[in-house]
Amino acid sequence: EKVEKKISETFFYDSEDIYSRPFVTEDAGIPINLLTLKHSFGYDCTRSVNLLLMDSQTLMYIAGNQVVLLDLKTKFQSYLRSSSGGGIGFITAHPTKQYFAVGEKGKKPNLIIYDYPSLRPYRILRGSGTEAAYVSGDFNDAGTLLASVGSSPDYMLTIWDWKEEKIVLRSKAFSQDVYKVTFSADNEEQLTTSGAGHISACKLCHIAKKLNLFTLCSFSCKYLYIAINLMLSWKEARNVISGTEWGNLLLWEGGLIKVELCRAEQKPCHSGPVSQLVLDEGELVTVGKDGFIRVWNFETIDAADSVDDTGLLEVEPMNELHVGRNVSLSFMSKVHDCGQPVWYAQDTNGAIWKLDLTFSNMTRDPECLYNFHSGRIEAMSVSPITYLLATTALDRSVRIYDFISNSQLSEIKFKQGGTALIWAPRVVNPKGGLIAVGFEDGVVRIIEVYDPKGLPVLAGQTNTENAEINLKQAFKPHVTAVTALAYEGNGDVLATGSKDKTVFFFAVEDEYEPIGFICVPGPVQALQWSPPSHVKSTLLILCENGFALQVPAPLPEEQDTVSTYQIKNLPTQYFHFYSIKSRIKVKNSPLEEEIALREKRKQEKEKAKLEWIKQQQEMGKEIKEEEPEEEPEEEPLPPLYIPEEPSPILCGFYSAPGKFWLSLGGYDSGFLYHCEFSNDHQDDPENRKDEPFEVIPIEDTDDNPIHQISFCTSRLLMFCGMQNGALRVYPLQDKDLSVNTLKEYWSFNVHDNDYGQIQGICSSYDDRFLITCGGDGNIFTFNILSPEDVHKELKAKIPSPRSGLEKEKAAEDIEDSNAYNIEEVKQKKEYERIMKEAEEKKTKKREELIALRHEFLLLLQKNQELPKHMQLHREVHLV
């Protein structure tokens, strides 16, 4: 037998050789440290498991392509980069907490074991455990084996002798999504995997000195809610307990449901899905999306059996803890602090909680350590005068951050989710404290940020908050989500765009006054006013469905808003994007050569025919009209492809008056298109087929389009946010875009590669910092390389409050999502005015009729009083 060489216990890899670095185009001369990560503000709380406690002081979680290590005492963050730049799938700790494993994503990703607390790479399990991404991993109780599960397409279960970097066993876990793998709580030779509607229990066996995997039993259920960590197995893995979507627990035995557990009076164990099951010191702990943690007697559940035909058994928990309102728990982890057990819980509504589950007289209340946005960040903007950042999301909150001190300053909640946000420019508010926010129900709110320490202090009160947010005004211009907001260059007009295919204009005053709205051919994607360098002030409107429009700023005094706010005669130029990508693909391809060859043959044939006619004429011969020869049929050329559904416009910006650049998704991604508005007017914009006059191919963007583009204030750097969460920087030599200027770039994978599409990207007012936010809920700040080696000490200044703010009544908010919008209110008033006028006319007519009737009755009476021979008969018609 060969003696296998073992890896030394003291061997470590060099961190610098492991971590992924930014990509820089060869010979571009762009410094590799153009941007460096400064801080992470967000938290990907929608991941099923994104919380790991190494000790009482260190909390770890995944943030895009980084693992963040957060010191709970100092609040200091340190980061571990992914080795591939493809993202991170899971993190899990060794039983001794001396090591932790990071399962990555990407092509044949690595699974890296780090030493703790040194964070040195200890072992690298190289890319044969899965094809695309690791989704879960677990060490056995002895810490000698590591089990990992891969994602689609292979769903591969791999058992590793991780210290020797060797695969002990590989097997397909299941044919559907697998979310979790765990070693059995009391038998490390047993494994359980769970996933989409199934649980599989397996046993490791040694046969002929080789480790084999036997499936003991597999449970499948169409209605089973299997989420991360949602199963526990014991008794030779034939007994498994799982949660359900409706909140009850299922006890399985030998592949069949033995009993369904509920509470007294058939109440569910949890009001909603059960997200985690934990076996802790002989007790079963269940974690629910309803914000409750319940503790059950494990022996009672182990011996449970149905007592009637319902298959239900009523069991009451021994203890329970309600963490809080609007709390949705997905995972919790235990650590010991000074010998006492402390639990930390992940809340999918955007929080991390510290919990005491001792259930004694000394039990402490749940403590919310951190709160974040929940889910995708919809929009963000930076202050025009200081280092403050504002963000909003569908979790109905607007948050203000100081990105110098790396802290969240303030938060305000509303009844609906935020969808668009812009910080008012300095020309609108010199103090830099005004923000316009658009919401999913069509409401726009103007909020102001101020330092409460600047307010007069009332007796018995103290102003200790760093920043406060005050609602200044609320109005509803749209019926569906507001998607874009833009202030005109001189600050006189605010434009709002929506999915309802309208753009509304407001006069910017102390109270924003409606000017009017226009209808556009599609849902609004983006709005941009022309820069100050343009002579005329115009608004570029980009619609999702391939339309671009240009309109001038409407003048309030020219609008007739008596009966409607709709502006009918605003001069509008249209551009309806017509795909030319298939034509671009034809160029420099075999197809282009074939077209050229056929054209050449045709020309040669025509030339030969003309030569023959000339010869015949010179010889004096009569040329008879001959029947055309039958030409051999050529194979038809493939038609140029035009997508049936227009490719979506993702972003764009002005390049010159009447000209603009576009980035598109779908089939037409891969290029930046230079377009121009034409002066030809067609009655129906839908019939237009406008083509860009210039295209620039963008490297590696065929399936990864640019979603966001912004520039530094000098316009010498162009920042691009990609669909795969990467950040790109293009240096612009002459402030204009060209094929040559966009050949060289700096790129860094920052957000999650699968769902971390960059939603916002912008630099600070002085170009020292760059901020990105993404679909993964993460917000990152970066230092931009400066000519100075060391920045002077910087500090964010919170705007001082307006004079008399403390005496103002609170602004009236619009809380009803079904409230009328501005135009609907106008139409209702107009309808009421018309109805009132009609009613007044009716009343006037009725009064005239009553007067005439009264006069007629008097005439009749006088007629009766006359002698008989002088009376008029009723049949007589008076003229």
Image: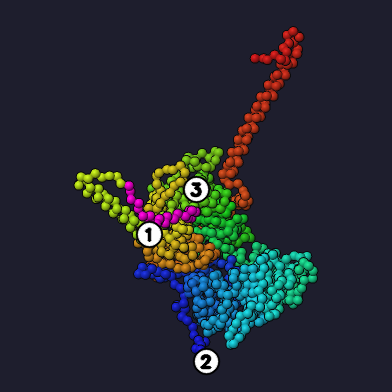
Asked if one can make out residue 382 in the rendered structure from this viewpoint, the answer is: no
- The residue that label 3 is drawn on is 521
Marker disc for residue 1: 2
Q: Residues within 10 Å of mark 1 (few under 14, many from 20)?
A: some
> Is disc 2 placed on a helix, strand or loop?
loop
Query: In the image, is 858 to the left or to the right of 584?
Result: right
Q: Nearer the viewer, mark 3 or mark 2?
A: 2
The residues colored magenta run 627-649
Report how far apart the C-alphas of labels 3 and 2 lie in the structure. Answer: 76 Å
Q: Are marks 3 and 2 in contact (CB under 8 Å)?
A: no
- The residue that label 1 is drawn on is 591
Residue at the image point whose x is 52% and y is 84% from the top: 164
Closer-to-camera residue (149/653)? 149
Please determine whether, in this image, residue 362 is positioned above or below residue 398.
below
Residue at the image point whose x is 46% and y is 61% from the top: 705
Amino acid type, residue under disc 2 in the picture? Glu
Amino acid type, residue under disc 3 in the picture? Pro
Please determine whether, in this image, residue 59 is positioned above or below residue 865.
below
647 magenta-colored? yes
Please determine whether, in this image, residue 55 is positioned above or below residue 558.
below
> Is disc 3 placed on a helix, strand or loop?
loop
